[in-house]
Amino acid sequence: MRKVLAGLAALVVAAGCAPVQSGPAASDTDEKSGQLRVWLFDEVNRSAKEKVIQEAVAEFQGGHAGVSVDVQYIQVQSRAERFKAAFSDPASAPDVAEFGNTDLAGYVAAGGFADITADVAAWDEGKDLVPAVLDTAEVNGKVHGIPWYVGVRALYYRTDVFTELGVQPPSTLDEIAPLARRIRAARPELLGISVGGKYVYGALPFVWANGGDIATNNGDKFAAAIDSPQAKAGIAKYTELLRDDICPPAQCAGNGGDASVENFRAGKAAMTIGGDFNRKSVDASAAAGKYGVVPLPGKDPGSVAPAFSGGNLLGVLSGTKRKTLATEFTRLLAGKQYQRKMYDAMGNLPTFADVQRAVADADPFLKPFTTTLESGTRFVPVTPSWAKIDAQAVLPTMLQEIVSGGKDVDTATRTAADAMNAAFSS
Amino acid sequence: MTTARGQGRAALAYLSPALLVLVALLGYPVYQLVVISFFDYGQEQVSGGAPLEFLGLGNYSTLLGSAKFWSVLGQTVGFAAVCVSGTLVVGAVLAVLSTRIRPWARTCLFLAALGAWATPAVAGSTIWLFLFDANFGLVNSLLGLDGFSWTYGKWTAFGLVAAEVIWCSFPFVMITLYAGIRAIPTEVLEAAALDGASGWRTARSVMLPLLRPLLIVVTIQSIIWDFKVFTQVYVMTGGGGIAGRNLVLNVYAYQEAFAASEYGLGAAIGVVTTLILLAITVFYLRALRRSGEVL
């Protein structure tokens, strides 16, 4: 036994015994024909998306003889595994892919997506991209994707309930809790506002509106700021909503954004925080025709709480053997014409200022969302560590610890800040 | 001496195909696991975006120094202990029961047990979640507990998952022990009866010693299975429960290794889990040998 152990140890220590690493991902070849592989996210209503994509593919193939485009739809839930596998093995990777802007920093650090700063600068449509949105595609000043659509959240409320009780939508962030409590007292079968312990993008506006932030960037390093007095004030305001007299923890603590909106769709909530992308599904639910949307109010009357600027990008993988074709296809699909078509099919908010204005003028529903966008949005820390913090569920755990009564705001935010600092420094 | 060596060589020759398969499918991955656990090995390192850094025992000291690891380990041990004893008790009771009931009832029992056994873990967990759903679940409507969430509280969530684990693992124990009881020669039991032994006495002094080898096997199996439970906890508590209070070691390793791309740290957790399981098994076997058992 001892001999075996010693032998094993010798094997391990032996020089050159290191885990596998794949070679440099960048490819020198730039083929002008063959198959272009594209990964897009699967959707609940995929057929609508598929129709627009097929149109774009047909147009692209018509303009490029000898090129075929193969589109694969991947699941959002398993995207992390799919992309990691693609980065580790360029041979099985796509040439173009859709991805969430919060994943960008991690993907770029892994060497996954190519720098396309020059391609976007040389593109005539590129100058119309909303600057704040283009920021979400940048890491260290370099563009690694074209914003395909943006998503922002606002306050959905039930017009019938509000009329019946004679109440108005809240005009400040601090009014939400008393109002929600009052509604639930009058209508106990309803959640005052449907929010959740895992709904980070619902909680962050409370932090930002109170002057706090997730982390601050001190030049080259991030430091957690979630335990600052301002951030704690916001966290306290948000977690106050997760109480038995508004949104009972036993029902709400495990909910993320989708589940929170689901309660509103089922007609079981008087308010919720939902995105422009939730509209189609709410219109096909019990709440259809009897709801309104206002921007989530800020600290002062008339102000808007800074929203998280979510959204998806289209990028070119650094391992691609067809960089020119991939860039051209990305520009086509992320261009004005197809963003407009995607808006008509899916309701995805465009990323070009002029297209955004055009669709907002034609559709009053979008007003609260474009107002929110115009009053300034915020973003998660742009660092590869964010992917890790996200995966370790640091912020959901913090919220859940507070609402399930395990820890107070001070302790929970300090624990979260420690976990974040550990990730930033690793 | 020469014959002994010759025998050894023959034995080795017979064993070599199995050894080859074991080394290729088990030895090499375990070796890789151990190697990875000595490095800072994240996604950047895998895809060649950052250089490898040898940490030595760095991952292990991070792991053993974290309070979270120890609380998760404690939870895992407690959870596995409840599941193992539950599985053994339910399995043994039903095995004894099935030797005493009519064939048609036994067939029904076996079919039901096999159904539970054959159900894939993900499907079983999901079905249990449906049954125990707070608003629409059958259990809550039968008990009149409308709106009670089983998965919110730490202990109700653990209890629910433990019940599901016992439900899907008792059939193995039951069928093994049933076969064991049936294999006891009737002469032995008759002799005991002729000597005037009571039913309890027969069970304790005759059947139990004869069944002991089987009991050892099912106990070790259950310990290993229940210590490594992943699917049920992951599915039923949504990846570790509210604020991660229902985490067990395997789900924790998954979070660290795959979700957070810390493959080095995740590998270290894997190695530690393996060592703990080996230690438990060796300890258990030695305790048995000391009590005079021939293994």
Image (cartoon, coloured by chain):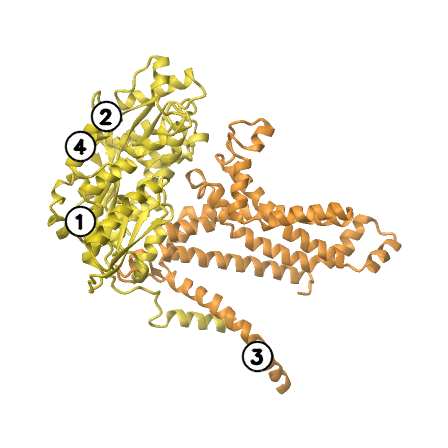
Discs 3/1, front: 1
Under mark 3, the amino acid is Ala
Discs 1/4, front: 4
Q: Are the residues under marks 3 and 2 on the same chain? A: no
* Number of disc labels: 4
In the displayed structure image, the side of residue A65 where residue A72 appears, left or right: right
- The residues tagged by marks 3 and 1 sit, at their Cα atoms, a distance apart of 62 Å
Q: Which residue is mark 2?
A: A364
- The residues tagged by marks 1 and 2 sit, at their Cα atoms, a distance apart of 32 Å
Q: Chain of mark 2?
A: A
Q: Which residue is mark 3?
A: B13
- Could you tell me which quadrant the N terminus of chain B lies in? bottom right
Q: Are marks 4 and 3 in contact (CB under 8 Å)?
A: no
Discs 4/3, front: 4
Q: Are marks 1 and 2 in contact (CB under 8 Å)?
A: no
Q: Secondary structure at mark 3?
A: helix
Q: Residue B179, percent across and down? A: 71, 56
Q: Residue A312, percent across and down? A: 26, 43
Discs 1/2, front: 2
**Sequence-wise, which precedes: disc 1 or disc 4?**
1
Q: Which colour is chain A painted?
A: yellow
Q: Are the residues under marks 3 and 1 on the same chain? A: no
Q: Which residue is mark 1?
A: A143
Under mark 1, the amino acid is Val
Discs 3/2, front: 2
In the displayed structure image, the side of residue A184 where residue A96 appears, left or right: left
Chain letter, colour orange in render:
B
- Could you tell me which quadrant the C terminus of chain B lies in? bottom right
Q: Secondary structure at mark 2?
A: helix
Q: Are the residues under marks 2 and 4 on the same chain? A: yes
Q: Quadrant of residue A254?
A: top left
